[in-house]
Amino acid sequence: MSYLTNFPSLKDQVSAEEWQARLDLAATYRLVDLYGMSDLIYNHITLRIPGTDHLLINLYGLLYREITASSLVKIDLEGQILTKPDTDYGINRSGYVIHGCIHEAREDVNCVMHTHTRAGMAVSSMSCGLLPLTQTAIRFVGHLGYHDYEGPAIDIAERERLVKDLGQHNAMVLNNHGLLTCGPTVGEAFNLMYNLELACRVQVDCMAAQTQIRLPTTEVLEKTAHLYQPGTRRPYGVLEWHAMMRYVEAEALNSGFPPYSI
């Protein structure tokens, strides 16, 4: 069996658009790990290759910090592998069951992220859902879907319910499971996930403190949530992406792992 983690560069074998998508997605995997949101070899982030219905996804077997632009697998919306590195690693079926249907149903979505963080799983198990405790959490008021747990996501029939529960939101709590975000770009999807995760961590901390919780008024909640929507002031995650790229590039130099950009 071949379980190598260093793969030849595909830079000269794919289009410029696909190579940039590979760079962006590989960097996002590294960022998720750097911010403590990875889970061994599990979970997945997908990105649509511009101008196509093809998606990029991780090899099922690599740590997020090992993922490179050339190690990503190209699949179609039904999860059929189109190209992948020469390795015995494949892909996680849940990756396209959950992600493929969202990419297919939402033309505005190019990136989908799914995590199993400790705080995300904790809040996904609370009947109250995400509470509007902080500015970070309030941005999701009226803009967060919930999907009931149906077991490991390997049933194609679940796709219709996933899409219905997400609706036009770009964030969703998978009850008793974890978190999901999506967006037009990797930067916007990552920014949403970072903030959703942070909101969950704060909620767990507040509830663990066992003290009286203060909530803003309904008027303030609605005003704040509106101000954080992409079309109100700016699409959050686009400006931030340049800083995130600088961060992941600097960390890659000292990580001991292959650079994400190969």
Image (cartoon, rainbow, N blue to C red):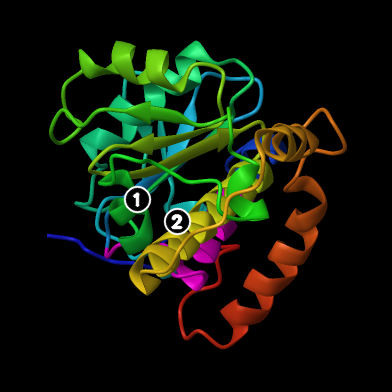
Q: Nearer the viewer, residue 209 or 49?
A: 209
Q: CA distance from mark 2 to mark 1?
A: 6 Å
Q: Position of residue 235 (x, y in %)?
A: 78, 38
Q: Which residue is mark 2?
A: 200
Quadrant where the C terminus lies? bottom right
Quarter of the image for residue 244 reads bottom right
Q: Give whichever of discs 2 and 1 has the lower sequence position.
A: 1
Residue at position x 25%, y 28% in the image? 148
Residue 133 higher or lower than 51, as above or below = below
User: For this view, does 76 lie left or right of residue 89?
Assistant: right
* Residue at x-position 22% and y-position 51%: 89
**Res 260 → quadrant:** bottom right
The amino acid pointed to by label 2 is: Cys
* SS at circle 2: helix
Q: Residue at x 67, y 38 (%)?
A: 221
Which residue is under mark 1? Answer: 123
Q: Amino acid at mark 1?
A: Val
Percent of width and height locating residue 96: 32, 29
**Span colored in magenta:** 23-40
